[in-house]
Image (cartoon, helix red, strand yellow):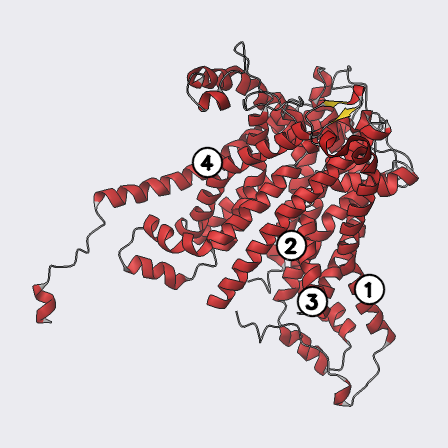
Amino acid sequence: MSATVQAGPATPAGPASGLSSRRPLGDRGFQVLALVSGLLVLVILVLIAITMSQQSTTWFTSEGWSGIFSIDWDPAHGKFGAMAFLYGTVIVSVIAIVIAYPVSQGVALLLTEVVPRRWAAPIVSVIDLLAVVPSVVWGLWGILILVPWLQAHIYGHVASAVNNIWILGNLFGFLNHNYVSGASFFTAGLILAIMITPIVTSLSREVMATVPTTDKEGAYALGATRWEMIRGAVWPHSQTGIIGATLLGLGRAMGETIAVALVVGASPTISSHLFTPGYTMPSVIALQFGEATVGVFRAALIGMGVLLFLLTIIVNLSARAIIGRHARRMGGAA
Amino acid sequence: MAVTAEQAAVDLREPSGWRRAKNQFATAAMWFAFLCMLVPLGFVLVTVIAKGASVISWQFLTNSTVPPNILPANVDGEGAAVVGTLEITGFAAVMAIPLGVLGAVYLNEYGGNRPLARVLSFFSDVMTGVPSIVMGLFIFTIWVLHFGYSGLAGSFALGCLMLPIVIRSSYEMLRLVPNSLREGSYALGATKARVTVTVVLPAAIGGIVSGALLAVARAAGETAPLLFTILTVEATNPNLFHGANTTLSWQIWENAQQPYAGAVARGWGAALTLIAIAFILMIVARLVTARFARYSR
């Protein structure tokens, strides 16, 4: 990247050229218009933080820190603890990443290192189609097709197979009385994994495309197989970028609402058993906001939106910082 | 030469069995990963088409009364939702696309490497990651609490979601416009605004349009930001600026939670309609890209 040559678009001749030192009004107006549009992003982000915090203050004042992070969620009795939702959000997103990461890495490697260029187009089409299917359609399919099928044919068998195995039994075993539920943490994670795979794949692919051809050819010249070349040349070079891409996927997973709300089971419980119903922050906002006419109830749901906003902003900031550092380092190396 | 001849001959044959097996296993695993993506996509598309196609009819798409959930699928229709989706998403696009393109013009044409432009570029990326449900709550607190539920509020929420996507995709396209075009126009004495509007933007228009269409396709399928902004109605509300409204995505969300066969069937029908709208937008975006692929990489 020749940063000095491509530093920016050419600028018109300044007053020094002696042609005209006054800029026409329209020219100046257009610049201001563009600047205002650019600033809109900052304005919206600041307004989100301010207005939503204001609307949720009664939650913080009436419950306090211990109340907010308690596990008691009982709107009818004025208990608004968010811990179960926080737990569910983290668990479901982690499941999604654990499933989506290997799949997206595999497809990204397939696209960059294995298939010839003209075969790449149909594979990219599949990724694009997957990305454009709306969340609510995944939710509809999830609750009507996937949930009953998993409950009837998969979860019961898996649970009885691993029930007595240490750790596995805690995660995938029966909670009690041979109970497994199709609508569960794991199903929500599975649907989320399908939904975030396209973004993680295309970002990872962009990162892998920056690996210098000389590195790869060097590995081949040393007699490496393709897999050895990937381990020796592609991975070391794209590690940080892939971490960034995965974090962006995690941010997406945390904020995804509708599909999760339909398949997670809507039960504010904290349990290590993944085949039991749970809840997440976005889905409780979506499902209970209609009933939330009381002050603190509504404030609690908006406050959970604030928590979600902060959480995703932190994840996104770190992801962007990692990706930016990666791009700068690679830009300097090339 | 003599020295090399005395050394053991270099083994130039295929790698040994174990290394080759690992390599083949890795390649197979990559194809398996692709299969893992293909299967859910195929499954969901086949299901939606199979269950939705039998419900969809001209009446389903245009009848303006959404029937009560207990009624079977062939009564009335989802016309109200089709109209709502088109007007709410359309108005969001009308707001967000010009603003997004102008923002990208600032970032690329005026900002350059200035700190402000770098900050704005960074935060528009961050805004892409703000969950759609947070956008809905935001519009609820800043607009709906004061002015009530309306299609307009839904358009605001969708517009907030589209804005950073449009900025990012337009910015990438503007960067591809060669500097020689700008320099040539400046040499003819054009002002910067004129150069941008008559030379730079037309040169990048294909990519900008296709990026904007993809943003519209994503926004059309969004449900979460509409839950707290448009409420929902059972009859067509042509007035975007006043009164509750409904969309296809909302109808799917509502019908997915119903036990009645008629409601579920309407859900599948609405899902097929929504997917069709999103795919058509995506295909048009691709055609536009192919048509204007002059300055693409």
Confirm or deny contact between disc 3 and disc 4 (CB under 8 A): no
Chain of the residue displaying label 4: B
Query: Alpha-carbon neighbours of circle 3 within 10 Å: few (<14), some, or many (≥20)?
Result: few
Q: Please, which residue is most extreme toward the top here?
A: A177
Q: Secondary structure at mark 2?
A: helix
Amino acid identity at mark 2:
Val
Q: Is residue B130 above or below residue B183?
A: above
Q: Is residue A138 left or right of residue A286?
A: left
Q: Is residue B172 above or below residue B95?
A: below
In which quarter of the view is residue A79 placed? top right
* Residue tagged 2: B288
Chain of the residue displaying label 1: A
Q: Secondary structure at mark 4?
A: helix
* Distance Cα–Cα, label 3 vs label 4: 45 Å
Amino acid identity at mark 3:
Pro
Confirm or deny contact between disc 4 and disc 2 (CB under 8 A): no
Closer to the camera: disc 3 or disc 1? 3
Give the numbered dot on residue A33.
1
Q: Is residue A164 left or right of residue A263?
A: left
* Residue tagged 3: B115
Q: Is residue A185 above or below residue B70?
A: below
In which quarter of the view is residue A61 placed? top right
- Dot 2 or dot 3: first in sequence order is 3
